[in-house]
Image (tube, rainbow, N blue to C red):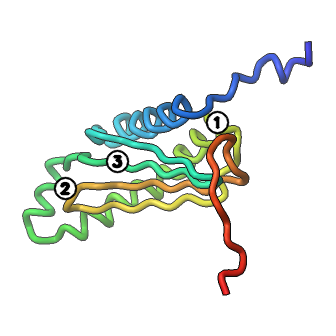
Amino acid sequence: MDGPAADSRPAQLAGGQLLAAISTSIVGILREHYGRGPMKAKTYALDDIIVVVMRGSGFTPLEQTIMDSGEPERVVNMRHDFQRIMTRRFTDTIEELTGRKVVAFLSQAHIDPDITIEIFFIDGPLEGFGAVEIIDAG
C-alpha cells in the first residue's frame, strides 16, 4: 500500500472519457441550478485549455419575454451574471475531474444562435492533449 491518500484518491479519467465526464458534469450543474441544460454539449481539450461548447440551451419564459421586448442583451448579461456566480462550482468540477488547478475561467453566452462557451485554463497540460507553442512570432 502507498498510504491512505493514494488509496482514497479516485483514478483520473483520460481521453474521451474525461471529455465526456466534463460535458456531463457541466450540463448537470446547469440543469440543477438553471432549471434546464443545453441540447448539445461538446468538450475540447488542448494542452492546458479546456473548452465546453453548449448549444441549444433554450430560454426560460422570463428570458424569452425579455428578448421579445427587444432587449436580448439583458438576457446575455443575466446569463453572464449566472456564470460568474457559478464560477467556483464549475472550477471545482474541472479540478476534481482533471486533477489540475484552474487558473482562469472565461464564459460567453450568445443568443442567435444559442451558444454558450465555458473556457478553463489549467495549471499544466493534460496528458494526451497537446499543442504547438510559438514563443517569439517575430
Q: Which residue position holds label 1?
A: 96
Q: Which residue position holds label 2?
A: 63
Left or right side of 12 for 38? left
Q: Amino acid at mark 3?
A: Met
CA neighbours of label 3 inside 10 A, class few (<14), some (14 to 19), many (20+): many
Q: Quadrant of the C terminus?
A: bottom right
Give the residue at x 64% y 51%.
130
Q: In front here: 95 or 85?
A: 95
Foreground tag (2 vs 1): 1
Q: Position of residue 86 (x, y in %)?
A: 48, 49
The relative height of residue 22 versus residue 86 in the rendered view (above or below) is above
Q: Position of residue 96 (x, y in %)?
A: 64, 36
> In the figure, residue 92 lies in which quadrant?
top right
In the image, farthest residue toward the right: 2
Q: Quadrant of the N terminus?
A: top right
Q: Which tag, 1 or 3, sits closer to the chain's start?
A: 3
Q: Which residue position holds label 3?
A: 54
> In the figure, residue 120 lies in which quadrant?
bottom right
Give the residue at x 71% y 80%.
136
Left or right side of 84 for 78? left
Foreground tag (1 vs 3): 3
Foreground tag (3 vs 2): 3
Q: Which tag, 2 or 1, sits closer to the chain's start?
A: 2
Q: State the CA–CA distance, disc 1 to disc 3.
A: 21 Å
Q: In front here: 78 or 92?
A: 92
The relative height of residue 19 versus residue 112 in the rendered view (above or below) is above
Q: Position of residue 87 (x, y in %)?
A: 52, 52
Q: State the CA–CA distance, disc 2 to disc 1.
A: 32 Å
Left or right side of 92 for 44? left
